[in-house]
Image: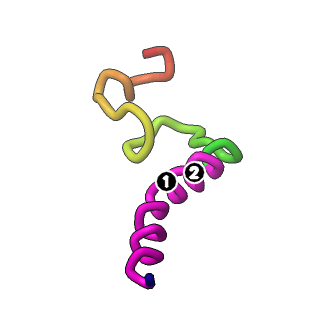
């Protein structure tokens, strides 16, 4: 029984983490273009218009 509870927790860990990050980004989205979030191609980081 303990194994199945462990497996359930492990299977729900990634979706819970994704929901947590989604909620955090809704409250405070990144304001500037940076290398950590979003599209990181050299063309897209030149300015906000591209």
Q: Nearer the viewer, residue 27 or 11?
A: 11
Direction from residue 30 to residue 46 in the image, left or right:
left
Compared with residue 21, is residue 3 higher up or lower down, i.e. above or below? below
Badge 1: how crowded within 10 Å, few (<14), some, or many (20+)?
Answer: few
Residue at 44% of width from left, 42% of height from top?
37
The residue positioned farthest toward the front in the image shown: 1
Are the residues flagged by discs 2 and 1 in contact, CB closer than 8 Å?
Answer: yes
Considering the numbered disc 2 on the image, is that residue within a helix, a strand or a loop? helix
In which quadrant will I find the N terminus? bottom left
Badge 2: how crowded within 10 Å, few (<14), some, or many (20+)?
Answer: few
Which residues fall within the magenta stretch?
2-24
Compared with residue 28, is residue 14 higher up or lower down, i.e. above or below? below
The residue positioned farthest toward the right in the image shown: 27
Direction from residue 41 to residue 30 in the image, left or right:
right
| Residue 47 x/y as whole percent | 45, 23
Q: Nearer the viewer, residue 6 or 32?
A: 6
Judged by its main secondary structure, the magenta piece is: helix
Q: Which residue is mark 2?
A: 19
């Amino acid at each position: 029984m303990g194994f199945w509870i462990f497996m359930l927790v492990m299977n729900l860990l990634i979706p819970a983490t994704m929901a947590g990050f989604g909620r955090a980004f809704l409250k405070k989205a990144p304001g500037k273009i940076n290398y950590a979030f979003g599209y990181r191609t050299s063309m897209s980081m030149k300015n906000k218009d591209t």
